[in-house]
């Protein structure tokens, strides 16, 4: 049985393509829940990004509503214009608190709350971006015993975000974009579909 | 058992400190934040701790207990909920087409804007109702737990820099006028026409600890309960339910849901994607 139950991912500039590649590489029986904060403008309608990513992923991709349960094998997307937070007891919360690093959803907000709630059971992943958001959150994940993955800046559309994360938090693994999905599958294991919770 | 003098990681100590601090605030001042979602609450507490130049949340607890001025500053941090005028234009558009016709059937309309913070939503609703010639027979009760934000709301002044965003929201919300007709520039602020606040009553009310105080035809409580945990949400939904007339309209945030709550079967969706519900029992 694996110890990593939640993967939190943060991406900014170039994130749609990077997230698409990572999610398309994860198996249908992926063993952990995934939560994603992707910087973007206010979406005119519901779940634009979630729908785009769902077409590339074998896993269900859903936009989070307040107090939704954290479900293994699902990809939970932060809605546009809300922060996404992880609560103890296996649920998400949303907030409309001010932007952090000019961003809502903020990667730091997601990562820090995930570190508090999941400690060593969380994996944090920083992908491409032109903004230092996520560096403080990844540092908190490492301090609490979680696992930190940073996309190799050489393979990133924009290198500033992975570079900022490495400078502030360091990393347990720095890997090329194409290696992130196989690494996450090793870290989180695979669960036979019948054992996955499907509310 | 041998004593183990190491603590189990800083975040566990911190969550203990938060629980003790919230208990202290409740017992000393009567403000009850114990049922708030912890993630967002923690960020606000830590920010206040840092601004006060303190090293731990235990130190913040000491400060709050011995210095009421510190408690006042913390209360402001914990109660400000950022909003914008006509946030979620699609919601206001749906309100115009689906709720306004219902309100026309009432001789007098009472609206409760619960958790109004600095008043952006109350003024937006006043503008909307005015454009439909309903405002003269409407009273909007805009309530918040914090007197300081109510004073700000009463002043009706919002940063001039926000007006571009608000204008764009207003247009997408079905606004038919020039938005600039509603305010005058005053230094760095846009001061809104006092006609708009004529029928707004700003009053102190705490959703967690106070009771129902009137019966309303419309209750707006958008993106307020996201700060509460499930059991506090149920409690507050009960309070809103008691305060809503039969066939009255309840509006919650676009990412909130009545599903799985204790009152789910008391409401019918008027517009489910815009989270407009009608009380049916």
Image (cartoon, coloured by chain):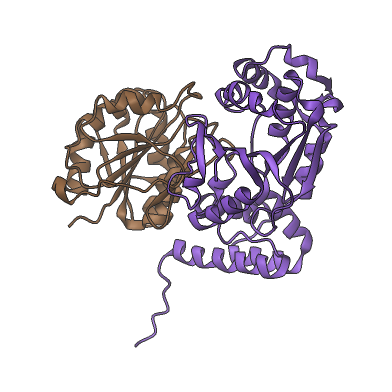
Is residue B116 visible from the viewing direction of this image? no
Residue A145: quarter of image: bottom left
- Which residue ends up furthest to the left in the rendered image? A192
Depth check: give the residue in front, A94 or A133. A94
Is residue B41 visible from the viewing direction of this image? yes
At which x and y percent is residue B239? 62, 53
At which x and y percent is residue B227? 55, 48
- Residue at image x 54%, y 49%? B40
Q: What is the quadrant of the N terminus of chain B in the image?
A: bottom left
Q: Which chain is purple?
A: B
At which x and y percent is residue B214? 74, 48
Indicate whether A58 appears above or below A93. above
- Residue at image x 17%, y 42%? A29
- Which residue ends up furthest to the bottom in the rendered image? B1
Indicate whether B165 appears above or below B66. above
- Viewed as shown, does residue A39 lie left or right of B279? left
Chain A rendered in what hue?
Answer: brown
At which x and y percent is residue B257? 48, 41
Depth check: give the residue in front, B104 or B31. B104
Indicate whether A192 appears above or below B192. below
- Viewed as shown, does residue A127 lie left or right of B88? left
- Residue at image x 24%, y 25%? A56
- Viewed as shown, does residue B176 lie left or right of A47? right
- Viewed as shown, does residue B144 lie left or right of A2? right
- Residue at image x 70%, y 25%? B104
């Amino acid at each position: 049985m694996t110890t990593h139950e939640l993967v939190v991912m943060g991406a900014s500039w170039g994130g749609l393509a990077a997230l698409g590649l990572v999610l398309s590489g994860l198996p249908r029986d992926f063993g952990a829940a995934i939560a994603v904060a992707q910087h973007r403008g206010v979406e005119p309608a519901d779940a634009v990004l979630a729908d785009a990513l769902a077409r590339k992923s074998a896993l269900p991709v859903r936009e989070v509503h307040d107090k939704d349960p954290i479900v293994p094998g699902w990809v939970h997307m932060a809605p546009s214009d809300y922060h996404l937070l992880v609560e103890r007891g296996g649920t998400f919360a949303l907030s409309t608190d001010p932007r952090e690093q000019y961003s809502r959803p903020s990667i730091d907000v997601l990562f820090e709350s995930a570190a508090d709630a999941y400690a060593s059971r969380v994996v944090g992943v920083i992908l491409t971006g032109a903004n230092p958001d996520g560096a403080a959150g990844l540092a908190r994940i490492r301090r609490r015993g979680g696992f930190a993955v940073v996309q190799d800046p050489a393979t990133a559309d924009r290198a500033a975000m992975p570079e900022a994360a490495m400078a502030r938090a360091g990393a347990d693994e720095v890997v090329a974009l194409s290696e992130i999905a196989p690494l996450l599958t090793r870290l989180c294991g695979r669960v036979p579909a019948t054992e996955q919770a499907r509310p | 058992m041998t004593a183990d003098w190491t603590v189990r990681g800083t975040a566990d100590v911190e969550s203990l400190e938060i629980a003790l601090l919230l208990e202290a605030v409740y017992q000393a001042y009567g403000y009850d934040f114990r049922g708030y979602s912890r993630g967002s609450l923690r960020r606000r507490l830590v920010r206040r701790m840092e601004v006060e130049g303190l090293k731990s949340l235990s130190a913040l607890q000491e400060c709050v207990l011995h210095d009421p001025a510190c408690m006042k500053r913390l209360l402001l941090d914990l109660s400000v909920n950022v909003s914008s005028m006509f946030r979620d234009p699609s919601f206001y558009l749906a309100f115009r087409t689906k709720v306004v016709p219902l309100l026309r059937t009432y001789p007098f309309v009472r609206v409760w804007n619960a958790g109004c913070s600095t008043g952006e939503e109350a003024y937006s609703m006043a503008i909307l109702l005015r454009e439909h010639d309903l405002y003269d027979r409407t009273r909007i009760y805009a309530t918040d737990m914090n007197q300081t934000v109510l004073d700000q709301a009463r002043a009706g002044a919002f940063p001039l820099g926000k007006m571009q965003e608000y204008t764009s929201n207003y247009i997408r919300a079905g606004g038919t006028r020039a938005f600039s007709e509603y305010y005058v520039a005053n230094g760095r602020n846009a001061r809104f026409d006092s006609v708009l606040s004529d029928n707004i009553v700003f009053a102190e009310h705490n959703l967690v600890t106070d009771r129902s105080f009137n019966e309303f035809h419309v209750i707006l409580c958008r993106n307020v309960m996201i700060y509460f945990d499930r059991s506090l949400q149920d409690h507050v939904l009960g309070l809103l339910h008691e305060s809503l007339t039969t066939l009255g309209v309840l509006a919650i945030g676009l990412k909130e849901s009545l599903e799985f709550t204790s009152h789910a079967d008391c409401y019918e969706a008027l517009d489910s994607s815009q989270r407009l519900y009608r009380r049916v029992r």
